[in-house]
Amino acid sequence: MNASKALMEMLRGYGVGEVFGLPGETTLPWYKEWSSCPDVKHVMMRDERSAAFAADAFARFSYRPGVCEGPSVGATHMIPGVAEAYKASIPMLVFTSDIPLHYEKRNMLTGIDQTAMFEGITKESLTVTDASELPNIVRRAFRLATTGKPGPVHIRFPIDQQGAEIEEPRLYVQADFKNCPGHRPVAELAKISEALKVLGSAQRPVIVCGQGVLLSQAWGEVQVLAELFGIPVGTTINGKGAFPEGHPLSIGVTGARGGTTYSNKVINEADVILYVGCSTDSAGTDGWKTPSLDTKAKIIHLDVSEAEVGNSYPIEVPLIGDAAATLRVMVEVAEKQEKKVRKLPRIKAIQKEREEHDAYVAGLETSNEVPIHPLRFVKELSDALPKDYAVVHDVGVAAIYMATFFKQAEAGRRMLYNYAMGSLGYAIPASIGARFARPNSTIVTLVGDGSFGFTAGELETVARVGGPNHLILFNNQSFGWIRAEWQLSYGKEYVDFATNFRPVDYVKIAEGFGLEATRVGKPDELGPILKRNLKKREPTFTEIIVKPEDKLVPPVPSWIKKAEKQGLAHIE
């Protein structure tokens, strides 16, 4: 058996159903074997970066490692997608083919030191220097990707090794690591007891859930613990879905991306904060101002990564372990102890502030402004979404309003954001990964016109793959987020510097790729068009004209204060 056939057998053994990739000369021996292995579908993308983004989204929605591949010449293109997965702790296997390694220093076409490129953005970069080692390398990659702090693993597969024979392949797989988390370590029991004691004595506790709660599928355990102690729960933007936002204890998204005045206030007034699966990054903490670095709150930090626990704030109790497994033990121990359930007045006060904010939002949801008001869009999309949906967002205007104002009633992964690195061009390729991870769901893909320029070619992939993937493009004819930063930090005289696009007919572009496309300019057209499109089982494309962020400042805490001083229209 040659190494390429062995690789296909290993991928099939690990239950890999799809690999996102792009052809190249250095990969053809592998492709030759692949062509006779229909169990592992090759999803051809139009850009290697897109292949990595698709694998990232597939992993987030399926709780299985995403797999992508690219040829040697395209290895550099994969960097943005792999970096996002690494910073976001997403389990992935990243294959790159290569020239024969003994030609690496002789300037052979497409050859470059791939290991050096990938070492800083993966848990490990592995090279197949002997074909017989390939099965062991694949097993190692799945173990590393799915256990501890998850993340991408790079496998470099030179062309001369792809056809090399293996006498004793040893193709067994390790079933524990087909899914993520592969194993679930539990925090030290003494620390769990200590944490419960701190929670029990708190007067104003709060729980903040990061994306680790979603990766661990720990939302049920979070809800039980919160209800047991009567603790309000917020999430970061990447953790949206970790707690049902229709629950009386929900305060919604917190921090700089999606946080509201009232939700951030709960964090700043807390005397105990329990972070669960949260990296306490700048987006989730509003630049470490929510709470401040000198907070008097006692902090309990639960995370599977020892590198993240206590990384930003002094902590009272560190809990190093899987979120679901550790919270399960916490609940079991707490149920046997006498608990001090939170008094209702505080919870009612928080709920009252939430109701007041909801009333403010409701007043904007019926806006008939032209261009269409973003809260009118959120309301109309909420009304149009079917029961089984998944929404993929680009950063910027496509993400911020949905994170803040869309209320995800049920817990679980329904919303996807890439706010680990926050690079443009994520949503369209990510939606393709989502299609394969959730084949029965209606995918809604929210795209900024700035991001669209990065991965517009993937509209062909969307059309070729098919299925209910409904793209909605927000056209403000600019890099609107940068316009807002210019306006608020430096003054209006700078907003046109390196931000504006000439007019583009996005409907014609989408139609050229074979998609049914519509442009919406009037608010009263929006609801009917969304309801009509979201019932269709094939892709659609809708363009919506919106204001750039310097004309209507979105709910970013640091921006709101500046907008108020400058007298700019804004949404809190």
Image (spheres, grey):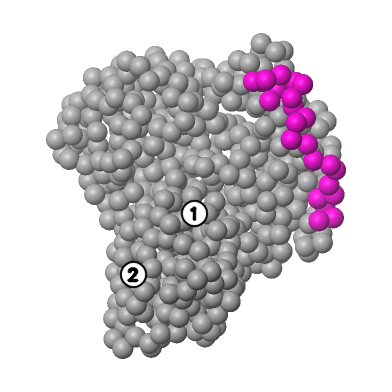
Residue beneath the point at 56% across and 22% down: 557
Q: Residue furthest front?
A: 106
Cα separation between marks 2 and 1: 19 Å
User: Which amino acid does the dot numbered 1 rest on?
Assistant: Val
Determine which of the numbered discs, if any, sits on residue 137 in the image. 2
Image location (x, y in percent) of residue 419:
52, 40
Q: Can residue 89 be seen?
A: yes
Residues drawn in magenta: 486-509
Q: Residue at x 32, y 18 (%)?
A: 297
Secondary element under disc 2, as helix, strand or loop, is: helix
Q: Residue 453: horizontal and vertical position, in percent?
A: 72, 50
**Looking at the image, can residue 389 be seen?**
no
**Which residue occupies 38% across, 60% down?**
125
Q: Is residue 2 left or right of residue 541?
A: left
Q: Residue at x 71, y 59 (%)?
A: 457
- Who is closer to the viewer here, 38 or 156? 156
Look at the numbered disc 1 and give the secondary structure of its residue. Answer: helix
Q: For mark 1, does the 10 Å Cα neighbourhood hold few (<14), some (14 to 19), or many (20 or more) residues?
A: many
Q: Residues within 10 Å of mark 2 (few under 14, many from 20)?
A: some
Q: Quadrant of the C terminus?
A: top right
Nearest the camera: 472 or 129? 129
Q: Which residue is mark 1?
A: 82
Q: Which mark is residue 457?
A: none
Q: Is residue 111 magenta?
A: no
Amino acid type at circle 2 is Ile
Rendered location of residue 525, percent (x, y): 82, 41
Q: Quadrant of residue 126?
A: bottom left
Q: Is residue 332 left or right of residue 348?
A: left
